[in-house]
Amino acid sequence: MEALTDFIRPELLILIPALYVLGVGLRRSKKFPDALIPATLGGVSVILALVWVLSVSPLSDWQSVLAAIFTGIVQGILCAGCAVYIHQLGKQAIKGD
């Protein structure tokens, strides 16, 4: 797990299982298109990561605000990517490929 924390802040790792559960819920919902699930998870993840990063970062000037926004977006994308990747690994293991 140490390699994962090289890229994703430890405080944001909780987003990965939360996004996975959200994705499973959206998948079971017959009204939500499967093709939109990764994008939806990405959007939710970026918003939650942005909220967290902006709330804990000292925002003293415009450069620190931009750095915090960039960090939140990247962290959100990485967390969503991990959640979708874990889901795909599970699907492949079930299929036997």
Image (cartoon, rainbow, N blue to C red):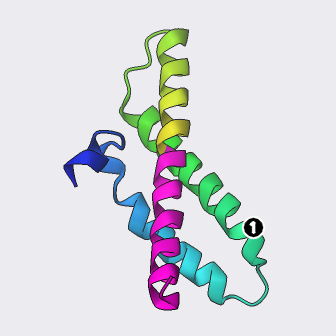
**Residue for point 54% across, 28% down:** 70
**Residue for point 52% across, 55% down:** 81
In the picture, measured across the screen, residue 70 lies left or right of residue 3, that is: right
Identify residue for label 1. Answer: 36
Residue 68 vs 20, above or below: the answer is: above
> Percent from the top left, x then y, of residue 94?
47, 90
Q: How many numbered circles are shown?
A: 1
In the picture, measured across the screen, residue 61 lies left or right of residue 17, that is: right
Q: Can residue 10 be seen in this view?
A: no
Kind of residue sitting beneath label 1: Leu
Residue 46 vs 14, above or below: the answer is: above
> Percent from the top left, x then y, of residue 30?
75, 90
In the picture, measured across the screen, residue 70 lies left or right of residue 13, that is: right
Please give the range of residues in magenta. 76-97
**Residue for point 28% across, 39% down:** 6
* Prevailing secondary structure of the magenta residues: helix
> Percent from the top left, x then y, of residue 60?
43, 12
Q: In which quarter of the image is the N terminus?
A: bottom left
Residue 33 figure quarter = bottom right
**In the foreground, 46 or 35:** 35
**In the foreground, 94 or 40:** 94
Residue 36 figure quarter = bottom right
In the picture, measured across the screen, residue 5 lies left or right of residue 91, that is: left
